[in-house]
Image (cartoon, helix red, strand yellow):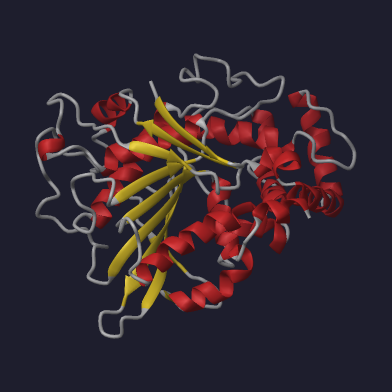
Amino acid sequence: MAIYVILKRTDFRLCMIVTVILVPVAIAFVVINFGQTDGLSSPGPGTNNATNSTGPNSTATLQFLIVVSRHGNRPPLDSFPTWSHPKNHTDVWPYGPDSLTKLGRIKTYRLGAKLRALYDGFLDHFYYPKDFIMYSTLTDRTLQSAEDILAGLFPPVGFQVWNSNLTWQPIPIYPTYVEGTHLWDDSITTCPTFYAAKIKSLSQFDLDNAANISTLMTYLQNYTGIPAVPGTHNGLYKVWDTFVSAENQGLSLPVWSTPVYPEPMSTLVKKLFVASVIGTDNMIRLFQGRLFQEMMSLMEAKVENSATPDRSMVHYSGHDTSLMGLQAILGMPQAYNTFVKTGSAMIFELLKNVDTSTYYVQVLYIDGNSADMKPVVLDIPSCSSPCDFNTLRSITAKYYNITDYTQECTS
């Protein structure tokens, strides 16, 4: 059960809505049943494993953390007519069409526990709103992922243990309205400028890949029931997403998929992703520029010693395209050639040279499919690693120097 508290204040034409979502008690099921996973177990009720420990990334130079993660495993968003396990089949997808699967819940809980292990000592073992905040997009799968992450990141200890049989505590999740993944489906009304650029980009994708798409979809129509429409990619993502979701769930794929999946289908779908959200610099700017702008503002406040409240960490629970958009802003090739797996995360560490007082940003990546979830450093092209904060601002400014987003979306 989610509890929503909505505060609304109207001042002439300004309306601000703050939604506070308290973590459902259902998360206790995840903690109790899946707490022991690959050595990333949560402390038992009343214990305090973090008090005298220091995570490997809790260094004297670390000043601030921003984490952006993708949700855990889910059913397919849609499926083709002949698929034997559509999203509404409760025998395979018992939690519902937009909810995390059991494996997805385990994966995001492990991510939270991994973050605790990495930054223990820098992060207080007690949860305090002044130290930490969790944001999420407003989908079931991202909200549930945020809940799982919080369960692994802040198991209650000491005075925060309120039920000796429950290694869980309620922590608020706040909505983010600056993350741009909703433009994937709803850009025609929310940002017409992005929509026009997207249509142009997708038309070019269809033109550039016409022969490969035609061959693939002609083959698939006999098995999927999706008609091959000459000159378009109709149904391509639907089939690919169905296969990926099935694999994540441990389901067997039909024999007829072998000639086309994972290749050449995955290469085409990656190009489709690029064309849909990061096909041009302006698409990147409109898609995730506001999210990156908020992230840079948080880091800048830290650098200027003006952060209020002065938090240690901010976490955004989002989508594969959340991370993909940020990678594109940073000029990383991964945005254009690699899929973001479920349960993956980008970590932005704000570091301070204790001798020169110079600030740097180091970007780490956790692959949600890796066994140990060990973070790897991502290189930022045009900048050293870690990247000087002022240099980072300079090379990314064109994507986030947004003063009137509504105007840009309608001009």
- The front one of 284 and 386 is 284
Residue drawn at 72 percent across, 54 percent down: 407
- The front one of 183 and 99 is 183
Q: Looking at the rendering, in which quadrant would you find the N terminus?
A: top left
Q: Is residue 166 left or right of residue 340?
A: left
Residue 373 appears in the picture as rendered: yes
Q: Residue 221 appears at what percent x and percent y?
A: 80, 28
Residue 388 appears in the picture as rendered: no
Q: Is residue 41 left or right of residue 147?
A: left
| Vertical comparison of 17 with 4: above or below | below
- The front one of 407 and 201 is 407
Q: Looking at the rendering, in which quadrant would you find the C terminus?
A: bottom right
**Which image quadrant is residue 283 in?**
bottom right
**Which image quadrant is residue 190 in?**
top right
What residue occupies the far bottom of the structure in this picture? 356
Q: Residue 249 appears at what percent x and percent y?
A: 48, 29
Q: Residue 260 appears at what percent x and percent y?
A: 70, 40
What residue occupies the far front of the structure in this picture? 12
| Vertical comparison of 272 with 27: above or below | below
Q: Residue 339 appears at what percent x and percent y?
A: 57, 50
Residue drawn at 63 percent across, 43 percent down: 262
**Which image quadrant is residue 35 in?**
top left
